[in-house]
Image: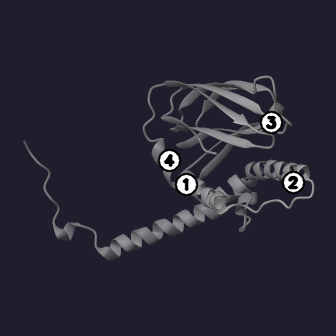
Amino acid sequence: MYNTDIPTRAELPTSRQLLRSTAIAIVAAAAILITIVLPAEYAIDPTGIGRGLNLTEMGEIKTQLADEAERDRAAGQQGEAPAPAAPDQESSLLGRVFAELVIGSAAAQASPAGRTDEISVTLKPGEGAEVKLAMTIGAKAAYSWTANGAAVNFDMHGDGGGKTISYEKGRAVAESSGVLEAAFDGNHGWFWRNRTDAEVTVTLKTDGAYADIKRMM
């Protein structure tokens, strides 16, 4: 039985090399965050690159839906001042950005041959929810979802490794089905917004090659 030789001190990277690699990774991640992730997910485009590459449309849809929901809630409070964003909401947004940028690609490295899942999310008036599948490039998953007699706005999209894509979107849709093929390694799925004045339950069924299914928000 042969055991791998233990590397010598000379073969190990120095502290300076490790710090340099870490700094390069941080700069690259920051550049991807500012130029790609923020415009596509949150319509924040300080450099203008996201709009030039047509990446801000997805973020604009999400922020528009969120703004409409906030105005509806404020109007229903009859004179009460809208509450400011809670610290945990702000930190969760940063955490979600980090998860999609760094963790999303790693979670999709080993997709199984196939799995089947069913998940339901209940949305209050004005509320949104996002469910995604961790998939590798070229993986396919059959899906069907229904708003159970109601209608929702939706955006089917993907992100991971600094890349984003919008597959399909619609307003006041009662149900949808098809096959989702991942354009790259990462998280691919659906964002729904309830624009009705009653609770809506969205039920999603999936069957295909993906490593995990998770609710992002």
Mark sitting on residue 101:
1
Q: Position of residue 57 (x, y in %)?
A: 77, 50
The mark that comes first in sequence, 2 or 1, is 2
Q: Secondary structure at mark 4?
A: helix
The number of numbered badges drawn on the structure is: 4
Q: CA distance from mark 2 to mark 4?
A: 38 Å
Determine crowd level at label 2: few under 14, some 14-19, many 20+ residues with C-alpha closer than 10 A. Answer: some
Instruction: Return the disc, 3 or 4, that comes first in the chain's sequence.
Output: 4
Query: Any mark on residue 105, and which?
Result: 4
Tag 3 residue: 170
Q: Are marks 4 and 1 in contact (CB under 8 Å)?
A: no
From the image, which quarter does the C terminus lie in?
top right
Q: Which residue is mark 2?
A: 74
> Label 4, label 1: how many angstroms apart (C-alpha)?
8 Å
- Amino acid type at mark 4: Ser
Disc 2 to disc 3, how far (Cα)?
A: 25 Å
Q: Quadrant of residue 29?
A: bottom right
Front label number (2 vs 4): 2
Work out whether mark 2 precedes mark 3 in sequence or the reverse, and give the earlier one.
2
Query: For the point 85% across and 36% down, which residue is it?
Result: 196
Residue lying at the far left of the rendered structure: 1
Residue 119 screen position, x and y as percent:
61, 29
Sequence-earlier tag: 1 or 3: 1
Instruction: Determine whether, in the image, residue 179 is placed left or right of residue 200.
Output: left
Q: Residue 212: horizontal and vertical position, in percent?
A: 50, 35
Near-viewer residue (135 or 51): 135
